[in-house]
Amino acid sequence: MEQQLYRKPASCLDSSASKAAKSRLGHRILLVEDNPDVADSMAMLLRLFGHEVLMAFDGKEGVALALQEKPTAILLDIGLPGINGYEACREIRGAGLCDIPIFAVTGYNQMEDRRKSQEAGFNRHMPKPIDMDELEQLLAGFPGKAA
């Protein structure tokens, strides 16, 4: 007996990133980064992993968007125009958003920088370029957005 095999249409084939995204609940991530090229690249990767991305390009805008949108996670640069990432994190925490994980994503990676991140209320200090696998593991430990 001959069995016919049918190929799935290309539109039905899953990439590994989309399979990974479907295997877990995505996050609604606020990305606060002043470098547009870095912000666009990170946003693209986060979307490939199944996350919704909101973007802000300075500290004040990041705080305002965090308070307005209440994302499920925040990736916050330290060296921002206006108020820096440490102050932005303090303001977000001070406004009562204590359950949202906030990750410092920064080029500043000395022990003093890590200490300041911890004091400001960050959940984790991640040097650039960030390891997306590490970030995904961290995000998996927090509730994602509602389906």
Image (cartoon, rainbow, N blue to C red):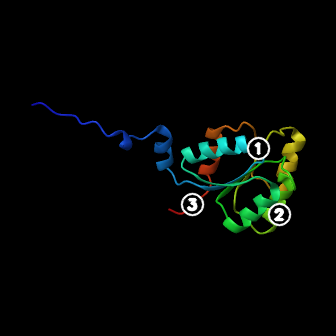
Q: CA distance from mark 2 to mark 3?
A: 23 Å
Q: Residue at x 84, y 40 (%)?
A: 108
Disc number lying in front (2 or 1) = 1
Q: Amino acid at mark 2?
A: Glu
Q: Amino acid at mark 1?
A: Asn
Q: Residue furthest right?
A: 112
Is 110 left or right of 71, judged from the image as shown? right
Q: CA distance from mark 1 to mark 3?
A: 26 Å
Q: Residue furthest top?
A: 2
Disc 1 element: loop
Disc number lying in front (1 or 3) = 1
Residue 23 vs residue 42, the one in the foreground? 42
* Mark 3: few/some/many CA within 10 Å (<14, 14-19, 20+): some
Position of residue 86 measured from the top left corner of the image (x, y, whole percent): 85, 53
Residue 100 vs residue 57, the one in the foreground? 57
Q: Amino acid at mark 3?
A: Lys
Read off the residue under disc 1: 35
Read off the residue under disc 2: 91
Which mark is on residue 82? none
Q: Residue at x 87, y 47 (%)?
A: 115
Which mark is on residue 145? 3
Disc 3 element: loop
